[in-house]
Every structure is written in structure tokens, then in C-alpha cells.
Image (tube, coloured by chain):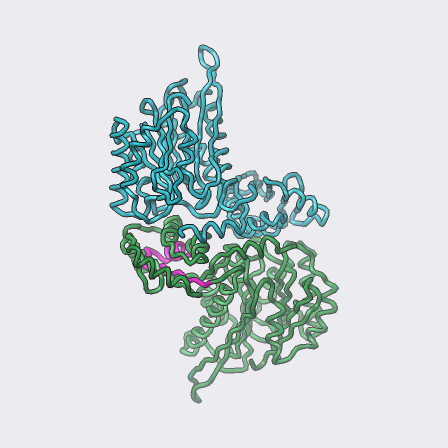
Chain colours: A green, B cyan
Amino acid sequence: MNGFRFAGIAAGIKKNGLKDLGLIYAEKPAVGAALFTRNKVVAAPVTLGRKTIADGRIQAILANSGNANCFTGEQGLADAKNTAETTARALGISPDLVMVSSTGVIGAPLPMEKFESGIPQVTAALVEGGLEDFSDAILTTDTCRKIVRRTGRIKTDSGAREFSILGIAKGSGMIRPDMATMLAYVLTDITIGAEDLKQALTHANERSFNRITVDGDTSTNDTLVCMASGEGEAIVGNEPSFAAFQTLLDEVCYDLAKMVVKDGEGATKVASITVKGAQSREDAFRASEAIAHSNLVKTAIYGEDPNWGRITAAAGRSGACVDQDRMDLYFGEVAIVRQGRWLGPEAEEKAAALMKKDEIDIILDLNLAEYSDHFLFCDFSENYVKINADYRT
Amino acid sequence: MNGFRFAGIAAGIKKNGLKDLGLIYAEKPAVGAALFTRNKVVAAPVTLGRKTIADGRIQAILANSGNANCFTGEQGLADAKNTAETTARALGISPDLVMVSSTGVIGAPLPMEKFESGIPQVTAALVEGGLEDFSDAILTTDTCRKIVRRTGRIKTDSGAREFSILGIAKGSGMIRPDMATMLAYVLTDITIGAEDLKQALTHANERSFNRITVDGDTSTNDTLVCMASGEGEAIVGNEPSFAAFQTLLDEVCYDLAKMVVKDGEGATKVASITVKGAQSREDAFRASEAIAHSNLVKTAIYGEDPNWGRITAAAGRSGACVDQDRMDLYFGEVAIVRQGRWLGPEAEEKAAALMKKDEIDIILDLNLAEYSDHFLFCDFSENYVKINADYRT
């Protein structure tokens, strides 16, 4: 992506010696927008980040794994400011243009000596091709990088022009939709105002990161940041070019969110639940959220069992208005319940065959009205328990 | 318990040949009260039970495991009525006095031929000492019987008199507080009106079954029934004797609820979370519920890790008003966080030692106002996943 450089190094923050300190740098101050966790317990970088992004301008993002700098009190906030200032000095820019993000263990103080020595190193390592190093530096229990690139076209007075969006995310556990999920960065070369960018990002987030779950726990550090370098075409709200940008941004965020779910702690399958025919938008959200969060549904998917009883029961307890005698349920194309009636062993066998796939689509039609919603989630295996029972040891 | 007889037999409803059909019978029609699941998808016996209990009188309860008779449509309701009528005929009483309960797999039709042959058998097997047989007949993934007996005393004009309460429950998975949990039966020899009994049962339920969770999924079959034989002393609302009865009923329900949590699917430890100092009753409920339901908190307890960051983060996402800089957190007597500050490695070591126990008490003081609430929950092990991935196969 033109206009951006990246780096990622091992600064000794993680005990295992892997990369743990990353930097994104825009050649010129970029227009920025960010969304943060709605958890009321928040990490120091989130508190600081809300201030940094307030003027809609950002030039660098310093991100570390191995320590979340959360529940670290006044010292944590001072440490976050300190790392932003050190980074700004190394880059020769204003501290107001540097955002910091942290992910990892909650409650331990930030090891400042590692940042003192690491920040000059990571700054010196900045290169255009450093994206994968940066991506590696923000992973925790993730088992793979999460990078999405897309190119779109918009019409201008002088013909069609290309623009690009690049997204990088991390996240595998403590994933529950209530704003962005853990850390995600989206970069674009478009020229856009801060208000328009915030609006576009909010729209994309609502349909992606706010519709996924791994384990139902909302992180204290969730952060989604978008930087627009202004190298390319100008985008203004309410124009066709804005729609083209929005569509591509939605896609990038959705694909990143899906990568997070796919790499969910212990996950072996990705599932989607679409609830249709609900009486209200909120009912569609509630029912799909309850199903996506149900440990019983998730363990059944792990067991490749089309356990429709658990799905309909989760909808029943969700608070949404439902009539069990009107429900239709499908696994992919296979109907297994119609008007509240199980369709028998043949339908069940067909559904069971579908469950062996890596991606499972479930559709619950409440047949009450026209509202729908959609969640992405993963199954639940013994490995989730293993990963999280031993996380701090 | 005077005035009641019990039986439990293997009728062939369960595939494994274990006991699966149980009967409780009161010598005379008893005063009855019942609470049912608030799940909007409900089993046929719950629909029927709501009608049966409406007049506050009940003489027999037929309960089966191996089949939940849920999501079985009109046929399921007809089958439930049919089993009640067959039981009434075998006992020579009115069908209006027979309640039926079912627990097990959702969605399969009730195997009526097993009931036709089983009901006369279980009726013939009724004896005063049949309590354990009955208890065995209602178990599914439970690994042990859940029976509580208590004796209380009330003052009467002619001196102190004893009264008894006997509770029997089943439940291990699909346990989340939204009314009673699965099947629980409480019997007493007290003389009481139906309205007073309902009031006392609601009070006891709110502090017991409605404050436990195993996996966050609300059953479609939850039922809590209380039968008062009227053999003993009379109890009227607002009298000291009512308070004595209420206290003992609360204890029996709490102990039964705790047994359910202790036998939670895959559980190795029982934990309690008390949230104090909340700004409202609802906030105390929300924060304690979010902590008790958190998979991250539950896996940490399984891993014997006093992971206070996950506990405070769960409170933060609960929707309750919290100020992270005022929180105090204790494991048993050991303070680990004070005014939002981690107390260091020595406190952590003491807390880690406590985590090796079978029962863990966690206290979170929000230090905002005076409201508190309390949940019982269990840890989360690989075995929960194993049990629920393979449940129907």
C-alpha cells in the first residue's frame, strides 16, 4: 500500500521470544477514525487512544502483544503516554499523531525497559514490505496472520481510478461483539474527511466485528482503527464513490472478522447463523446472538451433530418473540424443521452429512415478520479449555 | 417423609437400560405449587403442567428421563395428556391431579408403548422407601443423586412441633438461571394454602435455582414443583411459623441447586461469586451473572488460576455501572485487588493456593453503593465439551 511503512520485532515483552512490538507509519499525517471496546473496564491504551483520535488525524500506530496494559491504574496510563512520546521522538513527529495499542495478559505492569530499547529498533526497521512482520508482532493465541487486501474502482471526471484497502487484525479469544474485536487496523489510500471515515468505519464494524463471537467475553482492549493516507482519489459522503468505498470497506472488515472467528481459540469449524422472519430488528439480533453464544450449540457443531433442538431452545430463551410451531430451520440447503416439526431421519442424515464441512450455515426462519440478522461464530472444542486453563502459566 | 410413596423403574425409554420412569404419589391430594422455565420454546409437559397446577392441587408426579417430549408439536401434547391419564387410571385418581415431567433428548416423539407397559409397573412398585429409585429414574448426564432432607421446628399452642422438607432434583447441563432448573421436586408435610406455598416457593427459587449456572443455556423443560401433604402443622402467611418454613425451604432449594452445580457437566469445582457495593439490585445481578457465565472465568478456575483480570473484565462488560479504580476483589479471605490495584505476587500466590480447593468463593466489591447479589457456578473442563459433542450419538 502506497504511503505506509511497517515493522515488527522481538523486543522481549513476550516470554517466548517471538515478535511482540509492531509499528505502522504513514509518510504524511493520515485522516483517522477509530472504534473502541464498550467494556467499562478498559485498558490504558484505549483511554489514551480516545483522546489521540479525537482530532481525526493519526500518523503512527505502535502495537505490542504480551501485555495488555489493562487494570494497571495511573501508572499504566503514564506508561502508555510514555511509549507514545518515545515513538514520536524516534519518528520525529508530534506525540498527538501516535496511537498505541496493547494486547496480552491483563494486570501486569508494562515492562518499560523493553519499550525503551525496542522502540528505536522497530522505528529503524520500518519498510514498505514490513507488513507481515507487523502482523506477527500483534498475535497472541492466534495461530495465523489475518491480513486482507482489496482493490476497488471509482469513476472520476477523468475516467475510472483504482483505490486500495488493506486490513490487519489479531484476535482469537475474549471475542464477543460489543464494538471492534481486539486489534484491527485498516489502511486505505483514499482521500476522505474524518467524519465521513468514522461513519464508514462504524457501518462496516456493525456488520463485521460486532457480529462475531468466539467465547462471549468482551475484551478490555478492542480497537479498530482506520487510516486514510490521502494519496488517492477524493471521497465525499453521499456520492457514488463513497458507496464504492463503503462496499469495499465492509468486505475487508467482514473478511477480517471471519478470519478471527476461524482462528478462534480451539476452533475447528466456522458457523454462521442467520435469523430471518423476526418481528423486529432487535429480536433478530437477540435470537442470532443467543444461538451464536450457546455453548451447547457450539459443542454440537464440534461433534458434527445437527442438534436443532439446542438451536431452537437458544432462540426460545433469547428474549425474542418466537412461536415454536412456526419455526423453520435449515442447515445449508437442507430443511430439518418446518413449522415447528422435525422432518425425520432422512432430513437429519442429510444435515449430518453437511456438518462434516469446515463451514456450516444455519438459517432459522421465525416466520413472524421481515427482520433478519446474522452472526459468525466458531465451534467449541476441548482445546479452548486447554488454552484458557493454562493461559497465564 | 410421611404421606408420600415413590418408585422408579427401567421402562426402556433410555437406550442404556437404566431406570427412566419415576413416580411420586401422595396418599391424599396435596397442596401444590410449581414454577416452570421462562424459555419461550417449552416442552409439552410444561404446557400441560401449567394447566394441571392451576387449581393448586396435585397428588402424583410421573417423571421420565431419556426423552424431553419437547418440540414434538400437537402429538407431544396429546402424548403428555395420555401418560397423565394412564397414570391416573392406574392410581385410581383424577387425571387433573397428575403432573408429568420429561427430560432428555429434544425433538424425538415420546415412545408411547414404553409408557403403556411401564406405568402399571411403576405404579405397582410404589413404596415409602422408593425415594432413591425415583431419584435414579430422572437422571440424565447427572453423575449422582440429588436429595436433600431437612427437619424444622415451629411453635404451636401446644408446644414445639417438627416438620420436614424433602427435595429431589436432577440437572447437570443446559443449566442457566431463568426459573427452576430442569426437574426439582420438594415435598413437605406442612399444612399450607396454595397461594402461600407458591409465594414461599417463588422466594426460595429466586435465591437458589435462579442463581446458578452450568453452561448458560436455559432448558425447555425446567420445572420446580412443591407438594405439601397437609399431614403436619398448619402454616399461614405472615406468621412466625411461615418464616420458619420459608427459611428451611430456602435452605433445601439452595442445597439442591448447589448439588446441581457441583454435578455440572464436566465440573471439577464449585465457585460462588458475590458482587457487593453495586448501585442497584439489577447491577449486582448483572455483574454477578456475567462473571458466573464467563467461559474465560470458568476455564481459569479449572486451571486453578486466580485470574482476576477476567473477573473484573466480565463485570465491565456486564452493563452494570462500575468504576475500575474503586473495585476490590477477594478470593476467599485473600484480597488480590484493592481500589483497582493489583496487590502483587505475594497476594497472588496466596490466592493461587486457595484455588486448589474444591470450592472457591470470589467476592467483588464495586464500592459504589449497598446492593449485592450472589451466583453459584462451576468450572469448565474438557469434559463438558466431550459430553456435549457426543450427547446424541
x, y percentage for residue A221?
58, 60
- Magenta stretch contains residue A267: no
Residue furthest out toward the front: B17
Residue B41 vs A35, above or below: the answer is above
- Magenta stretch contains residue A275: yes
Query: Which sits in the foreground, B337 or B368?
Result: B337
Residue A140 vs B77, above or below: the answer is below
x, y percentage for residue B175?
45, 44
For the C terminus of chain A, give its image quadrant. bottom right
For the N terminus of chain A, give its image quadrant. bottom right
Residue furthest out toward the bottom: A158
x, y percentage for residue A348?
33, 57
Report which quarter residue A270 is drawn in.
bottom left
Report which quarter residue B14 is drawn in.
top left
Residue B155 appears in view: yes
Report which quarter residue B360 is drawn in.
top right
Query: Which sits in the foreground, A389 or A81?
Result: A389
Residue B56 appears in view: no
Relative to A136, is A304 on the left or the right? left
Query: Which sits in the foreground, B350 or B171?
Result: B171
Per the rendered image, the range of residues in magenta is A269-289
x, y percentage for residue B248?
48, 26
